Amino acid sequence: MTSAREAEPGGSLSEAQAAGLDREDLLDIYRLMLVTRGIEERGQLLYKQGKIPGSFYTGRGNEGSAVGVARAMGPDDVGTPLHRHVGVHVVRGVEPWRIFAQFMGRQDGPTRGRDGNVHFGDLALGTIALSSHLPSTMPVAVGCALAFRIQQQPRVAVAWYGDGSAQRGDVHESMNLAAVRQLPVVFVCDNNHYAYSTPNRLEYAVEHLADRAAAYGFEGVVVDGTDVVAVHREARRAIEKARAGGGPTLLESVTMRLEGHAVHDDASYVPHELLAEYAKNDPVDRFRRWLAAEAGVGEDEQQALAAAVRHALDEALHRAEASPLPDPATLLDGVYALPDALDAPHHR
Ligand SMILES: Cc1ncc(C[n+]2csc(CCOP(=O)(O)OP(=O)(O)O)c2C)c(N)n1
């Protein structure tokens, strides 16, 4: 028995247009997904070349979900992307070369060579960096939403989390406060079937994680996260509903982690049949097929777009490799924020 609404697939071009996406938007979304995948594929190579300190995480399989939701946000909205959400940073405007610099711990990465290589955000672009303790940024997102309410700003916070993180107490506290105060926040659960090696069946006993929303008193929606058009439509609905004073939504986006938890993990515990089933619906390939069938985006146009992305990422990588490691003398810089550093649009 489920109480969540099960979202319809993305549908035809006219349905996508009705949901606010014209052909140009659709091509831009495809480009953003290619950039996301291309950045992470190059990240894997950098790791193998020994250029990335620590481990390395990718969001392969999650590109449609990350890009679809982020593309539905407004310019002044904020979000708390996690380790599967390079796509969110790409959409918010972190330049790829800065993401490569971040991966390599270089000075020009958003954290200037501090903290984990995928632990980053850029306040000026409305993203708040994750900390290791998942999902510690969910209460932060709810706090932002509370601030927007108090200051009467028409802004929305997007709080990302995973199926494993969903079992933590901070999720419950965040959702309850958001519900009681009808805050402008959208909770996005990227359910990729596994939390490291723990499968869904050992994480929760409801049919969908989105079913839990009813218990807090707001709407739960479950969407196929490999279908970027459907994800975007549902995210946009939830975000605009929150902006209009309609309160929170829990959007569960169902995907599959197509690689190990991180580069050190071969994911041998994942059944091959499950991976094979989702590999058929790889979000990038699926959208490419949709664009061809529904929007008449032919092979030539797709190839040209892919070539432009490859070229831009190769350039970005060169630029990042030229970025120095941070000067050890600056180690304590930024440990405490000074008032000037907070003088960004999202802190005024
Ligand atoms: C509180 C906490 N416990 C354990 C970890 C170690 N850890 C990092 S990622 C991860 C899996 C999280 O699963 P999920 O929320 O489903 O996100 P996914 O990695 O699958 O995208 C774990 C257990 C952590 N970071 N924080």
Image (cartoon, helix red, strand yellow):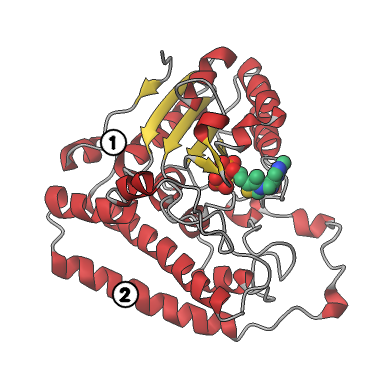
User: What is the total number of numbered labels drawn onto the structure image?
Assistant: 2
Q: Position of residue 75 (x, y in %)?
A: 50, 48
Question: How far, Cα to Cα, is label 2 from label 1?
Answer: 28 Å
Q: Closer to the observer: label 2 or label 1?
A: 2
In this view of the protein, which residue sits in the foreground, 268 or 290? Answer: 268
Quarter of the N terminus within the rendering: top left
> Residue sitting at 48 percent across and 65 percent down?
40
Whether residue 151 is visible here, answered yes or no, is no
> Residue sitting at 58 percent across and 53 percent down?
83
Q: Earlier in the sequence, mark 2 or mark 1?
A: 1
Whether residue 143 is visible here, answered yes or no, is yes
In this view of the protein, which residue sits in the foreground, 244 or 44? Answer: 44
Looking at the rendered structure, the kind of residue marked 2 is Ala
Q: Residues within 10 Å of mark 2 (few under 14, many from 20)?
A: some
Q: Which residue is mark 2?
A: 308
Q: Which residue is mark 1?
A: 19
> Residue sitting at 51 percent across and 30 percent down?
201
> Residue sitting at 66 percent across and 20 percent down?
176
Quarter of the view holding residue 331: bottom right
Looking at the rendered structure, the kind of residue marked 1 is Ala
Q: Position of residue 283 (x, y in %)?
A: 33, 51
Q: Position of residue 32 (x, y in %)?
A: 38, 59
Q: Is residue 345 above or below residue 263?
A: above
Q: Is residue 140 above or below residue 149?
A: below
For the residue labelled by badge 1, is the local secondary structure a helix, a strand or a loop? loop
In this view of the protein, which residue sits in the foreground, 209 or 68? Answer: 209
